[in-house]
Image (cartoon, rainbow, N blue to C red):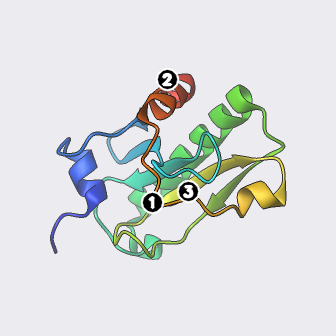
Amino acid sequence: MSDSIFTKIIKGEIPCHKVYEDERTIAFMDIHPVQPGHVLVVPKAQVDHFQDLTEEDYTAVWLTVRKVARKQKEVLQPKRVGIQVVGLDVPHAHIHVVPFSTLEEFRAVPDMTAEPDHAALADMAAKLAQ
C-alpha cells in the first residue's frame, strides 16, 4: 500500500498545523474545517478502517480525541464538541473532532475547493496545542 497523505504528514513530507503528537497518534488542523477549530486525530499506523486498529492504537486514538476535545471546549467554549468517523477521502483511519454550538454548524459542508487559510489555521493550532 502506498503512503496516504496522512502518512506523508506523519513522516514530515507534507506540512500540517499540528496541535498534538505522541508515539501512536498525531492531531492537526483540518485544512477545510467544518467549523473553526476542526481537528483530525490520526493513528501513526496506516490502517484504512478504524475498527481494524490494534487495541493499543485504537485506545491511543480515542485518548487523543478526548484530549483535543477538552482543549477545544476550554479554548473555544462551544456548546458541544462532536466527532465524525467518515473515512471516505483518505484510506487511513482518522477521527474528525469538531467544536460546534448548533446542529447546522456540525453538519456544515466545507468548501473543498477553497484555498486553505494557513494563517488562521496556524493561529488556531497555536491556541489548541497541547
Q: Return the disc, 1 or 3, that comes first in the chain's sequence.
A: 3
Q: Return the disc, 2 or 3, that comes first in the chain's sequence.
A: 3
Q: Return the disc, 2 or 1, that comes first in the chain's sequence.
A: 1
SS class, disc 2: helix
Tell us which disc is closer to us: 1 or 3.
1
Query: Which residue type carries mark 2?
Result: Ala
Question: According to the image, label 1 marks what residue?
Answer: 113
Q: Is residue 87 left or right of residue 82?
A: left
Whether residue 71 is situated above or below residue 62 in the rendered picture: above
Rendered image quadrant of residue 109 = bottom right
**Dot 2 alpha-carbon crowd within 10 angstroms: few under 14, some 14 to 19, many 20 or more:** few
Instruction: Please tell me which residue is depicted at 62% across the width and 54% down the height of the picture.
Output: 34
Q: Tell me the distance, in whole angstroms, between the alpha carbons under discs 2 and 1.
A: 25 Å
Residue 9 position in % (x across, y down): 27, 47
Residue 106 position in % (x across, y down): 73, 58
- CB within 8 Å, label 2 to label 1: no
Q: Tell me the distance, in whole angstroms, between the alpha carbons under discs 1 and 3.
A: 19 Å
Question: According to the image, label 2 marks what residue?
Answer: 126
Residue 43 position in % (x across, y down): 37, 55
Tell us which disc is closer to us: 2 or 1.
1
Query: Which residue type carries mark 1?
Result: Thr
Question: According to the image, label 3 marks what residue?
Answer: 96
Instruction: Please tell me which residue is depicted at 17% across the width and 45% down the height of the picture.
Output: 13
